[in-house]
Amino acid sequence: MAQPGTDQSAAEDGSLTGEARALIDALPTPSLLLDPQGRILHANPALERLAGYPAERLAAQGLDLILAQRTTPLDLDSTERQEFQAARADGTSFWARLETAPLPGSRNRIGQILDETARREAEGALALSRQREALGLLTNSVAHEFNNFLQILIGYIDGLKRRLGDRQEPFVQRAIARSADATERAAILTRHLLAYSRRIAPDVRAVDLDAIVADLAVRLEHDLPPGIRLTVAATPGLPRAISNPTQIEFALRHLVANACEAMPSGGTLMLSTFRIDPGDRSLQQPSQGSVGIAVGDTGQGMSPEMLARALAPFQTSHEAGRGAGLAIVHGLMKRQNGTITIDSRTGEGTQVRLSFPAAPERTLH
């Protein structure tokens, strides 16, 4: 049997709910009305626009409809801020913050869901900037120490050249030639490390990416680990790129080393070039077009979490064999007005694309 006053209380609560709905609809922020059990009674138009779902569907399915990658449910009775990754109806995701508070005069609660993506990205960018600054200081220190050791090696190799240069033993000549080549490459590496740490913009010019890839492929064939097959694909009529050829090779060697490490049991390493025609809206300067080099492998790939942090300094993982080298490559690309993009899935390999501005036609003659 109903207790005395029950009908009156229900009527009052229903009246309050109606008033609350009108109030929520007038709010410019995405808001919702919750009953004591945490069910959605109403969602305002601002929340419909944010989530991409109609209020009726949100009320029928609850906040689980927009939750993404969350293992524990939201606590709708908590007055604490709760942040979670949400998914819109169109499949795009955003970071959301839920805040709830009791509705005066009612057992219901009023909540707001705010888009925190911009704040999250700003905080991430600031943290990344600080990490890169720290990496720059570390790189500068290491490069200077490495350069000191390198000068000693160069001095001794020059002395060996003078003393043994006229000897015809194949081993002696090969050892001198390879040692000299190694120290020359180490000197180039040191200069690039110093350039990275000092944020010095490299000299750029119109270069042939297909020629760079072909030359690197010839030198890589004898250095690849056993079980790894190299394939090369050129792009007919590829425009030249505005870039620095030495830093391109430096970046490619980092990527090749990462790819080989991701294939401990063997696989295929793919080097290819590509072009994006002028007018493509994905470009920062659509009028110029873009050209680039892709490095792909059939290795372990990266999880979504690892992929999201792949370009962060100091990031490393034995899961995919990709470490701080990607952060260095990212820095090199930025200083050449280029971009780096990564496509990877666990167990399906990885492809890294280095894109450069295409040279204007007049620079080709």
Image (spheres, rainbow, N blue to C red):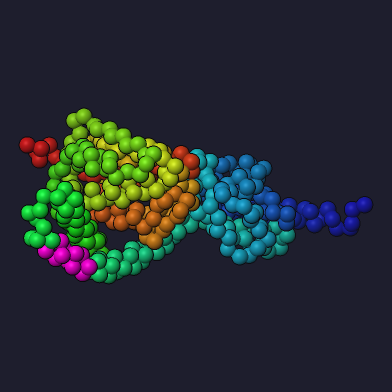
Whether residue 127 appears in this view of the structure is yes
Left or right of residue 55, residue 227 in this image = left
The magenta region covers 148-159
**Residue closest to the eye, 136 or 95:** 136
- Total residue callouts: 0
Residue at left offset 24%, top offset 32%:
235
The residue at the far right in this view is: 1
Q: Position of residue 25 (x, y in %)?
A: 57, 51
Q: Is residue 156 magenta?
A: yes
Q: Position of residue 46 (x, y in %)?
A: 52, 49
Name the main secondary structure of what is drawn in magenta. Answer: helix
Q: Please tell me in which quadrant of the rendered image residue 36 appears.
A: bottom right
Q: Please tell me in which quadrant of the rendered image residue 65 appears.
A: top right
Q: Give above or below for 338 relative to 161.
A: above
Q: Position of residue 121 (x, y in %)?
A: 42, 57
Whether residue 304 appears in this view of the structure is no
Q: Is residue 60 magenta?
A: no
Residue at left offset 56%, top offset 49%:
69
Residue at left offset 41%, top offset 58%:
315
Image quadrant in which the C terminus is located: top left
Left or right of residue 345, residue 339 in this image = left
Residue at left offset 36%, top offset 57%:
324
Q: Position of residue 174 (x, y in %)?
A: 17, 50
**Residue closest to the eye, 320 or 336:** 320
Left or right of residue 363, residue 358 in this image = right
Q: Give above or below for 328 relative to 144.
A: above
**Residue closest to the eye, 135 or 117:** 135
Q: Give above or below for 298 relative to 144.
A: above
**Residue closest to the eye, 10 or 124:** 124
